[in-house]
Image (cartoon, coloured by chain):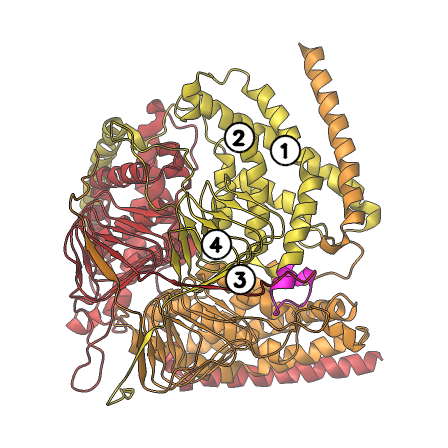
Chain colours: A orange, B red, C yellow
């Protein structure tokens, strides 16, 4: 019996050793999905810790540090900023070296990543300088949520509990880094928000103040969207692309405006989709729940789906059980 | 070179110190999004730990404590309850003091939070007393899932793996606390469930037994919904509000019935939206996938969208590559 | 005062002790939702750790182990495989013993779980042997994402950041285990992916290479779906069931084909639903955003919703502010 088990163990040992060889061989054959002998990518855990600290600076006293007072706020913020700067410049340098190593598309421009550390320092500092300004914009988002949701009991509940505000806050941070041409990290930030809230806002989108996303699960806002002031979206709304252009060789053309423009004070209800780079939703229009729009809509328009059809059952189903 | 780096370090040090001052100043200017010198808010980590322990009591032996037997169950439950009571009364006291401090809307009623500890003790105990009753209702939800999903192999798989059951269980716990007028904590619980399951059920909604949400991502159930027995919802269904009333000064009126009533044995398919406080979906009706309803529907009715239009392509696209 | 508090403490102590008794009693009465004195279920934490290690083998150098080189890759993979084999056979044995204990439906077939350890060893080894083959298929999924999304800057960004690829990778792993008739664990894996990505793919679905899900929140792919090569889905798409058959006693019939068949190179846009086991979407067809399909669609067809209706407001609402 023991011999038999030993035999099985030896068998599985051989099989695993043999399998190891086959897997490593497959790394040679399939080099599109391996990252061996490459410059390090930024680290997800560090990036999410950075976002958590940034949120503590933007909304002081709400989250982890609950004994924050006017007397200790200055020390606290100073401490957080020091740590943020160090980790930011390290992670940005990582992302820039990756970009410069030739795997990222922008690297094709000819930069080899030489002065990544110096550039990272500058970008980290430039980013942090935006924080006071960002607080002003994010306060308009909080206000918009309070004005837009009768279920909200106060600003604190919104800051404390609303996933829409979490997604918008992280988007605004990521958009700043994206504007400073930091690669990869902005996407890591918004994908973290996406995973936690179900709201997927591309860091490249341009979004005005007073933006409110209620509930939010399933919302998608594409890379080249332009959204004006005081727009409201509900859960499941897609602001997306409708078709893609290819070049003469059949390759996808990247970087053109593929996503819609939403003018000020538009409201888009649950599960509606607005598609296309030429599509403009005019100011103060309302897009009804479940509507699918692929053409522009003039200002002050209410767009709704056709009435659904009703049919009565002759013999209503009764529950089995 | 070293001098140069030191110069850079000094530069960034000055910049960060200056920035710290600007950020703390912005806390004065933007006092809608700071929480300094305030009573502590409840703690998210503690609240989620409470929910995890409550789930262990409701579904014994499924999750963390897998060697649970009839012989040790009593000791185990006793131990859990003791810890739950202590943490609940502490967190509820926190929420009540917050409410009494004047930032919460209910505080406007005049209570100053004086006897928060005593009230918290009573509410914590009253809540825990509901647990046996809650188990009876939640067992009907498990049964409804088994009856409603041909992919389910048994009750255990539903309890172990179904996000719909997780969201409903946490909603039922949160609704109990909400009925006991505990502020903030019920929302923290359901937002935790929302983040994990994509299902957003407001603790204020009233939902009968035998409730089944299949898959569930994107489901939104608003604060003033009333849902009767044995209702089934699929992913992406919104039971929401359609418009809000404002008072003479233009402020949002809060607390009116804004969300629909769903009668017994109704089934609502994926991505349908039912909106409006006056909207009633009659018993045993079926709302088809993608339908948008803003008016009442009589009992025993099947509601579907207009047939989509089909168009044939003359030259079918062939994949490039 | 102290006496008073002691009195309260004694009161709550009695109440909790009494409550403990009532809860344990309810375990006797409601035996559909307890798991006492039963064989252990597999462990969620261990299963998610297994998935994380499997992803490290499939995409070497991207995630946790960032200093991976050609020189140390073999040792690294060997080490991972050894740990994976041990944990897999332990968890699979757990799942098989559960199945054999009579709570799982398949157990009805008469197996009592006796040789669970031996079967688990074989299944764990057979599963790991698939890994090189799986890498080939998953590489086609990465390529499909790059071809399908103009916002993607390269393969690395897709592997590093795209939730659609994460969900598909975990589905492909879970589908392998499902094909080897491992109970429970495949569902635990895909529900973990569902929780992180909002994408719910049943391990029983059959999906060809080059599969791309963009954004993905709210996607549901049912147990008996068949999806051919190079299909693209956007967020909120449901491939679901439309009605269920019951046997003469009114019990749900499980195991029949209830979900649609999607032929090659089909694209299905956001929030569309395709329902029914007889429904076939023909090759190269396009299903528009928000469309609801319950009948088959021929190849090369573009399906869109009726145009929405536009209504102009006479007195445009102005924001109260």
CA–CA distance between discs 4 and 2?
37 Å
Quadrant showing the C terminus of chain C: bottom left
Mark 1 touching mark 2, by CB under 8 A? yes
Name the residue nearer the viewer: A253 or C261: C261
Name the secondary structure under disc 3: helix
| In the rendered image, residues at marks 4 and 1 fall on the same chain | yes
Image mark 2: chain:
C
CA–CA distance between discs 3 and 1?
31 Å
- Label 3 or label 1, whichever lies nearer to me, is 1
Vertical placement of C257 versus B262: above or below?
above
- Image coordinates for residue C75, horizontal then vertical, percent: 79, 40
Numbered badge on residue A192? 3
Q: Which residue is mark 2?
A: C182
CA–CA distance between discs 4 and 3?
40 Å
Going from N to C along the chain, the mark reached first, 4 or 1, is 1
- Image coordinates for residue A56, horizontal then vertical, percent: 48, 70
CA–CA distance between discs 1 and 2?
10 Å
Q: Which residue is mark 1?
A: C127
- Image coordinates for residue C107, horizontal then vertical, percent: 43, 22
Numbered badge on residue C298? 4
Q: Does residue B241 appear left or right of residue B31 in this picture?
A: left
Highlighted range, magenta? C145-159
CA–CA distance between discs 2 and 3?
31 Å
Does the magenta segment cover residue B227?
A: no
- Image coordinates for residue B306, horizontal then vertical, percent: 31, 62
Vertical placement of A204 versus B219: above or below?
below
For mark 3, does the 10 Å Cα neighbourhood hold few (<14), some (14 to 19), or many (20 or more) residues? many
Q: Does residue B290 appear left or right of residue C259 in this picture?
A: left
Image mark 1: chain:
C
- Total number of numbered discs in the rendering: 4
């Amino acid at each position: 019996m023991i011999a038999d088990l030993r035999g099985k163990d030896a068998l599985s040992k051989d099989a695993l050793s043999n399998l190891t060889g086959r897997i490593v061989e497959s790394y040679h054959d399939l080099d599109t999905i391996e990252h061996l002998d490459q410059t390090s990518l930024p680290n997800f855990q560090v990036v999410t810790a950075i976002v958590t600290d940034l949120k503590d600076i933007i909304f002081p006293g709400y989250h982890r540090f609950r004994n924050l007072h006017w007397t200790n706020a200055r020390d606290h913020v100073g401490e957080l900023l020091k740590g943020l700067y160090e980790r930011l410049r390290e992670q940005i340098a990582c992302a820039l070296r990756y970009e410069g190593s030739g795997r990222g598309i922008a690297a094709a421009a000819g930069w080899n990543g030489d002065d990544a550390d110096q550039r990272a320092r500058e970008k980290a500092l430039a980013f942090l300088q935006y924080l006071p300004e960002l607080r002003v914009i994010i306060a308009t988002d909080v206000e918009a949520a309070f004005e837009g949701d009768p279920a909200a009991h106060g600003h604190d509940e919104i800051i404390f509990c609303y996933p829409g505000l979490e997604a918008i806050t992280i988007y605004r941070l990521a958009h700043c880094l994206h504007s400073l041409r930091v690669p990869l990290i902005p996407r890591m930030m918004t994908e973290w928000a996406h995973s936690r809230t179900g709201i997927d806002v591309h860091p490249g989108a341009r979004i005005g103040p007073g933006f409110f996303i209620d509930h939010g699960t399933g919302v998608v806002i594409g890379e080249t969207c332009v959204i004006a002031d005081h727009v409201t979206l509900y859960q499941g709304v897609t602001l997306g692309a409708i078709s893609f252009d290819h070049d003469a060789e059949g390759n996808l053309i990247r970087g053109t405006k593929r996503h819609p423009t939403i003018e000020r004070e538009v409201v888009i209800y649950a599960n509606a989709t607005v598609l296309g780079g030429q599509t403009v939703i005019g100011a103060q229009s309302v897009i009804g729940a479940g509507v699918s729009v692929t053409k522009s809509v003039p200002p002050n328009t209410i767009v709704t789906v056709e009435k659904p059809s009703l049919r009565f059952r002759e013999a209503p189903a009764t529950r089995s059980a």
